Image (tube, rainbow, N blue to C red):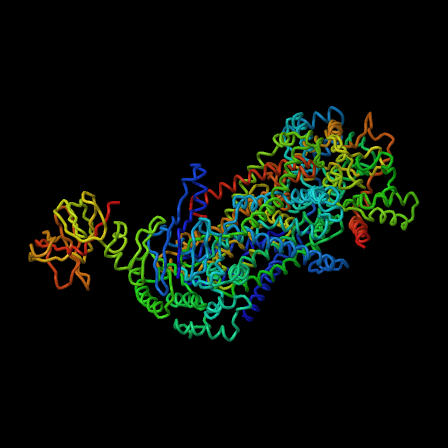
Amino acid sequence: MTTTASPALPATKPEIRRVRRWWPTPKLLIIVAVVGVIGYLALVPLYYLLWGTFFDANGFSLGGFARAYGDGRIGGLVANSLWFAIGAAVLALFVGTSLAYLNVRTDVPFKALFFAASIIPLIIPGILYTIAWIFLASPDIGLLNKVIEPIFGHGIVLDVFTVWGMIWVEGLHLSPIVFLLMVAAFRAMDPSLEESALMSGATRLQVFRRITVPLTRPAIIAAVLIMTVRSLESFEVPALLGLQNGIYVFTSRIYFVLRTYPPDLGAAGALAVGLLVLAMIGVAISNLAGRSGKSFQTVTGKGFRPRPMELGRWRPVMGAAILAYFFFTVVGPLLVLLYTSFLKFYQPPSAAAFKSMSLDNYRQLLHLSQAMTALKNSVYLGLGSATLVMAAMAIGAWIVVRSRIPGRQLVDQLAFVPLVIPGLVLGLALSFVYLRSPIPIYGTLFILLIAYCTRYMPYGMRYAVTSMQQISAELEESAQVSGASWWQTFRRVLLPLLSPGLLAGWIYILVVSFRELSSSILLYSPGNEVLSILIFEQYENGQFTVLSALGVVMVLTLVVLVTVAYKLGAKVGLKQD
Amino acid sequence: MKTIGLWRRGRLACVLAAGIALTLVGGCGGSPTAGGPKAGGSDGPTAAEKVYAEIAGLSGKQRRDKLVELAEKEGKLDLYTSMTSDVADAVTGEFSDKFGIDVNVYRAGSETVLQRILQEQGANFRGNDVVETNANELFALNKEHFLAEYKGERRDLVPEAGRFEGWTATRFNLFAPSWNTKLVPAEQQPKTWEDLADPKWDGKLSMELADYDWYLTLYGYWKKQSKSDEEIDRLFAAMAQGAKIAKGHTVQGELLSAGQFSVVASNYSYIVERAKKKGAPVDYLPFVQPVIARPNGVGLMKTAQHPAAAMLFADWLLEEGQKLLVDEGLTPAIVEDNDPLKGVEIVPVDVKTLVEHGDEWSKRYEKVVSNGEQVKDK
Amino acid sequence: MLCVKNLVKTFDGERRRRSRAAGAESARVFAVNEISFDVEDGSLFTLLGPSGCGKTTTLRSVAGLERPDSGTIEVGGRVLFADGSGAKTVNVPANERGLGMVFQSYAIWPHMSVFNNVAFPLQVRKRADRPGKKEIAERVMRVLQTMELADLADRQATKLSGGQQQRLALARALVIEPPLLLLDEPLSNLDAKLRESLRYELKRLQRELGITSVYVTHDQVEALVLSTSIAVMRGGNVVQLGRPREIYENPNCRFVAEFIGTSNFIAGTVSQRENDRYVVDTADGPLVLDSAASIPVGTDVVVSIRPEAVEVSTASRAGEVPNEWTGKVLTRAFLGEAVDHVVAMGRHEIRARGNPSVSIEQGTEVYLRMDPSKLALVPVD
């Protein structure tokens, strides 16, 4: 007995239909389509998750919850998870926001480095990034420890295998997302708001605390929310760093639950539902906070010329901080990767190690059967999912922030749902649905495209909503008053104003889609391999050095893609500085 | 503001309610995890099974010729496997070259292979003809009645411990302790499994997070050696004392080469062998005995669209393919002339217990490895 | 009061980009090139010029929002910035200069009420000289009263109209009673009508409060109405500095003449000079004019003639007054308070502005008379 999955219609649809028109306007059609797509993408896996959680072969059951939360160690798990997630989120927020501020608002030196620093950590697959950090800061073999030992003696040892170490690695790995979000927010804010505070006699700290932070609150809240949920959901760091010393978090638990046969989807689902509830509360809070002021709209009709603030005597200090950050997030890990990619097996640097270096791993990469197909597929999927998601979410954000459609908050929450659905569950849900679909999507690249769009919808929505909240409604109203249709207003007025945020989201999705593995692995089919599958294979093969080479190639590919994107963006006036 | 907050929370409830409502609507179909239809279960033999049965009676050259003839007609083969990609590339490349049959390979971890087949079979989607993966998953697939009976003279050559209902072992993964030769002098290498419990390895030994198959087999072996449960528990607890828990044998092997650990309790010998070949300072020889062997095998799908190709693949993998596996550094199921494991005591993983009580053993092992850390924390 | 000396500011980014291409220090692009001026106590000094002339950069340098490359800036004898020419380097940060500033976009903080916007500068003072809560409230209300915003004190700042926002920005700048008020195109975001009324309002306030101000604008009418003195800037240099009337009547170059008001330009050569009286030969005949400039005979010059300096008449007074030319009316336009005639005269078209009582039909032969004291002699660029 099987059922075809009912196409999950969003609950808001009937309400939209009430518009008194016989003929659906393009506006209505677009809105309905976007809401439909968001609802569909979110509800299919949600439906599957809830079904699997609450129903077993015998009908309704709460056994999954008993199995998931009945364990005596669950308290420790939750505490560790939250400590880790919030710690990483705070670190990422602090680092990402400071960098974004320095980049957009000041004449800080080495601005060229920001580009690399904001993209490269996103590109390096989690496994590689984490392992690179083991090589850098393990108490036993860490290169950094070797460097600081002569300076500080034996007493001080960097240990990456602690919660602080996990927070450090995860926080740094996440900080680019905050950076991208906050750059968009700062760019959209009139700098004279800060300058006038400075002229009023406020110190820089006061300006930041009393003007900058309150004005960019929606973006900050969005960033904290995403970072926290992301870290709760992250697997590589807790698995590779936490477990060595027995630090367990939520995800390790889900991993255990899912790997047994038959997989206990009930228990895994119960854990995921817990995350879902937490996240939904988070979204509600952030909406409330973002709502409490129309006043946060800092992009008004009044034009402004951004002029960088001069740092004066702090310039060299900040410059040094930037270099340090650049070293820790980019150069260090990348050097380790590059170094490893030339070796036959990883060994700490020594004369012998350098002597044994060769390009064999790259050569091997060339001979990998599907390398080119995978690269091509990844590029297609990355471009496709980034473009589709950002296009749909721009309209989704309009519905959430601007429209008066009842239930619009629901759209926001729906778009957030996939964030807490574990990748494997998403893979299961999609294969379940499309195996039964009359349209032959299963076994093609499209199923991966759907998976990616689903997974990255939450990020796209955050980027778009954050930008939208900062744009004054007047701008839109004035366009409408001047006779522009809704669509013209959207395309000619809103899109260009949203573009810094949309571009940031687009780049983020493009980049992270290259490393999506957990749902791809179940859904790909022969001929449709993607790069992350190759990474997984090399990893499984124990070809760590080849994996590093693959990582280096990926970084290069994406740097080129993203650079082109920025250049094109600048050309069509997307970037506004 | 307050009312809006409540209202919004109401919306949140709506999301969940909507989901649940949908669940109820579709609920009559049963849970998606409850397993799909039992393919071919009681409706008599499938077309593929008929082909298998027809061929099963043949042997030798006659059998091969017939299979080649039919398989050429079918033209291609869909293989799902958890072989690592280099092995899979070698195997499928050779097979294609020899018979001119295109092989489509889906590669993933064994759990994912299982999940995929469960999903596809549940939807009556005939995705693969043959599956090559770990014992655990093959057992599960057989339990779901997805695997057809496979008979033949090559199967008969596989040792007793490798012949199962519905599937046949093609190779073994060997669990053996391995060590970093720079950090562990020759005379200090572990000689027995019990040696791993020695306190001198505290903080230097690594155990893998999910090796409960190894755990339950070693447990059973020690039990047979008439050790008491307390004694065995103490041994494992002593091993886990101060142990560094790693996730994944690959990372574990890499970190062993790098010197992060001195000794790894239960890595696969082929991973260490490969690192050693590349010159990494690691070794696992002489074997700590008994070596614990976990079979990997091949099973034919009842729903195969290319049954002859599937059967040809199984035959070939158990014949010419065995040598290929040796070349790839793996341990073949059928031992012919020069056995690299001659004189080594081998204990196969207790697959039956693994499948029937795997969950329980998994939890026990999880406790063992997490206790190790708790002791260390103090 | 404010004394700016030899201020230099180059575009950092530009310079770097250029020098990479050309590899030369000579490629420096000056935003502000060695400008100096003094602002008298209680006066309103205007930096006037087209966009990109360096006026805003100068203002921001005074504010401390930008760091000049060299020069000195003093307010009331206090050195705010000094660098180069052997002096000790001083650069007081913007937040310690204690100046008031009104921004083009007003920069009203949208997350605060009207009251809090104005209270902010007092609230962020160092603990030692921060007034008490009560005093803050008093001072805020006093300044809000002056700006006629007292009733709106509790209103969210974004709910104000454009004019109210402008006054709020002014209130915020004035609440600390700064020695110097900086205004960066504060009227440019308003509609024409409001702009005009606020222009006078601003002038009244400035004169009443006697607050020394530096005003940046590209609007010449605004500059003429408001200023005590004006510095006309172009390409990072001050081209002319003087009282509004001086600048209007005696532009020292074609750029100033063109930029401030409308002008007729007639090219010619100085043919005679006697003290301040010049005779310039033009293609259509000689022009007699008075000028304080010292230009040798034989120099090519341009004569700038303001439309209102041209009298149009149907009757000739030749011999009585100099500079009477004949022409034919091409068009006329009624402007309400004046009538414009465009007269074709030889090779030139001259715009004349006069009392609306004189209105002459198109095609009529007329006499044009130009008062020698109202003509300006401008060197050829």
Residue C26 sits in quarter: top left
Please name whichever residue, A368 or B355, is drawn nearer the observer in this view of the structure.
A368
Q: Residue furthest right?
A: B226
The mark tally for this picture is 0
Asked if C373 appears above or below A575 in the picture, the reply is below
Q: Is residue A576 visible?
A: no
Judge left or right: residue B349 versus residue C68.
right
Residue C333 sits in quarter: bottom left
Q: Position of residue C17 (x, y in %)?
A: 44, 41
Please name whichever residue, C245 or B90, is drawn nearer the observer in this view of the structure.
C245
Judge left or right: residue A121 versus residue B237.
left
Please name whichever residue, B88 or A116, is drawn nearer the observer in this view of the structure.
A116
Q: Residue furthest top?
A: B61
Q: Residue at x 42, y 36 (%)?
A: C22
Q: Residue at x 18, y 62 (%)?
A: C338
Q: Position of residue B339 (x, y in %)?
A: 82, 28
Q: Residue at x 77, y 31 (%)?
A: B152
Asked if B190 appears above or below C116 in the picture, the reply is above
Q: Is residue A283 visible?
A: yes
Q: Position of residue A340 (x, y in %)?
A: 67, 36
Judge left or right: residue A99 versus residue B105.
left
Q: Position of residue C64 (x, y in %)?
A: 46, 56
